[in-house]
Image: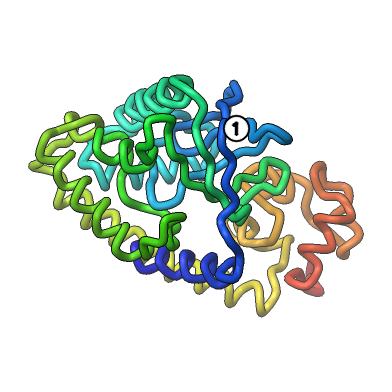
Amino acid sequence: MRLYLVMIGLLVWGSCGALAWERFEGATLVADPRNDGDSFKVNLGDREVRVRLYFVDCPESSGTSPYQRRRMREQAYYWGLETVDQVMENGLNAKQFTHDLLLSGPFTVYTLFVPTPGNVKDRRYYSMITLSDGRDLGTLLVAEGFARVHGVVRETPDGVGGGPFTTLLEDIEASAMLKRNGVWADTNPDLLADLRALSRKQHEDEIEQHAVYAALLREGIDPNHADQATLEALPGVGESLSRQILKHRPYSDLQDMLRVPGIGPSTLNRMRPHLVFSKDS
């Protein structure tokens, strides 16, 4: 997982290496139910944007989507927690910690406006936050045990390389663990090694499965015979839409799939290069 995130960080760095950090002083927190410990909406004076902290990752505070549930399970393994309920409880604590800090006074946002992967309708931009007292928000979250060192990295606004800054944060995280700050208070030390090993094994299995799905996409997926997991590999298809595809099959051709609720011309065009229809469909 760390190698994967470093690779993402390099890609992000490469895409914005020639850009300079933009600095927004006097920023304020915008109330929003989707705010989290490491992701929240801010007012920059002339606009409102949603930011996502570089370097750190807080526990999820809700688990409504399959993606969030997978994230919560992986976070539980990392922190040595026995249940995902503990993840959510600590995620709410992290959210409150960030909320209180950002409401303590205007803060400074540093960003390159590099968007995170994901929903373009709810675009987030990687950023770093300096509080009104000069402290870095991400560093505080790690020190208090409300975040782990896990995420996209890059050179900081004051010129510290992404690697050295990550190493510093990892030392701070080790200190938080020894002090049993924040999430670490709930860690089961007898399970930590086994849970992290399980997490690494599941990640390796996911990489292998992704390779299988990539091969299927190249060869073509038949919507009349594919199982739900394979259908979810199609661009624009998630858990809900894959169920609708299963419910309304068989399909005679590509255009016939437009009768599936949730599939419009745009989604169909994204799926088009990866679909095949067998003669017995």
Q: Residue at x 64, y 35 (%)?
A: 44
Rendered image quadrant of residue 273 = bottom right
Task: Report the side of 165 relative to 23 (left or right).
Answer: left
Q: Residue at x 37, y 25 (%)?
A: 97
Task: Report the side of 44 relative to 277 (left or right).
Answer: left
Residue beneath disc 1: 42
- Asked if residue 228 can be seen in this view, the reply is no
Q: Nearer the viewer, residue 147 or 112?
A: 112
Q: Residue at x 53, y 41 (%)?
A: 109
Residue 206 lies, in percent from the top left, at 42, 62
Rendered image quadrant of residue 112 = bottom right
Height in image: 270 above or below 183?
below
Height in image: 89 above or below 68?
above
Tag 1: amino acid: Val
Looking at the rendered image, the quarter that the N terminus falls into is bottom left
Q: Residue at x 34, y 63 (%)?
A: 2
Task: Report the side of 117 relative to 190 (left or right).
Answer: right
Q: Nearer the viewer, residue 125 or 225?
A: 125
Residue 200 lies, in percent from the top left, at 28, 60
Label 1 secondary element: strand
